[in-house]
Image: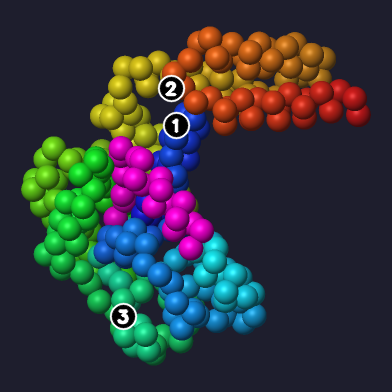
Amino acid sequence: MGSCFAENMGKRLDDLSLTLLNQPFGTQFNPTRILNALAFETTRASDVYTEGDFYLHPDFHSDFISQNPEDLLAEIRVKQEETKAFLNQADTLILTFGTAYFYHDNILNRPIANCHKQASQRFEKHMNQVSEITQAYRTFIKSHPHLHLILTVSPVRHTRDGMMENSVSKATLRLAANEIAQEFPDQVTYFPAFEIMMDELRDYRFYEKDLIHPNEMAVDYIWQKFKETYFSNELVVVDVAWERIIATLHHRPHPTKKHLHIANLEKIKGELASQFPEVDYSKLTEKLAAEILSLKASLGS
């Protein structure tokens, strides 16, 4: 959970057919707003924003949108129940902090996660102090003793805050993550995605054209470091095998060799159970089956 960087890492973990829930409430940049979402508080109709003919909620991403406020709240409640149940069974929670800044809604008289393009005079901008973040996470961690938390600071600069403000914000997040990890060494670790990007990948060839977001080469590098840090030997074996399978899955064969490619995919699909009996490979099986059907359909066209 957390910033766009968290979603990117989540997708890569999902490609390995791991049992996970990726960004259940959409992108969340502020660490205290992330915990607010994980408090699973009852959503109220009086909190809902309107944008044209649509309704959105200030505590959630615009992924949650509806033309009916009750439908919106119902969708959020379903996702809350799903996430709560998943969190109770999970053993690891990965959180990426994007910014220490958040907005206070003067009408609702409380902090929110998303302004949803409402009138700017409705909001006041604030920044969490290190102590606020650490206290919030202290409470959360103590109430979830079964969870191992992996904390990261997003390497993406929040230039809309201003470059100087972004530096202060990132420093605040880094200090908070450090204090949390030091206080709970058996339950919390810090993964240095921010430091890797700023120090090891400081050349602009590792950035997208906007010179803000890490490009695919950079994300691949950080992902490799993440695997080296957290993957067990068993998961490394699965990762290597999965990479080969995904490469085969994405291969586009010459028209004269489609039959051979289909046979190869069917062989891989059939061998998954014997090769990886301890892995839930259902997602990969679905992808293989869909690709096989697509290739067979193209042969018949």
Residue located at (48% from left, 36% from top):
14
Above or below residue 103? Residue 301 is above
Q: How many neighbours does mark 2 have within 10 angstroms: few (below 14), some (14-19), or many (20 or more)?
A: some
Residue located at (62% from left, 75% from top):
68
Q: Secondary structure at mark 3?
A: strand
Q: Which residue is mark 2?
A: 239
Q: Which residue is mark 1?
A: 18
Q: Secondary structure at mark 1?
A: loop
Q: Which residues are magenta?
A: 77-97
* In magenta segment, residue 131: no
Residue located at (86% from left, 23% from top):
299
Q: Report the amino acid beneath label 1.
A: Leu
Residue located at (30% from left, 37% from top):
91
Q: Report the amino acid beneath label 2.
A: Asp
Which of the numbered marks, if any, corresponds to residue 110? 3
Indicate the position of residue 140 as horizontal and vertical percent values. 22, 55
Indicate the position of residue 179 as horizontal and vertical percent values. 10, 52
On the image, which quarter does residue 160 sit in?
bottom left
Q: Earlier in the sequence, mark 3 or mark 2?
A: 3
Q: Earlier in the sequence, mark 3 or mark 1?
A: 1
Apparent side of residue 51 relative to residue 213 in the rendered image (left or right)? right
Q: Report the amino acid beneath label 3.
A: Arg
Q: Secondary structure at mark 2?
A: helix
Q: How many marks?
A: 3
- Give me the C-alpha separation between circle 3 and circle 2: 44 Å
* In magenta segment, residue 95: yes
Is any part of residue 78 visible from this angle?
A: yes
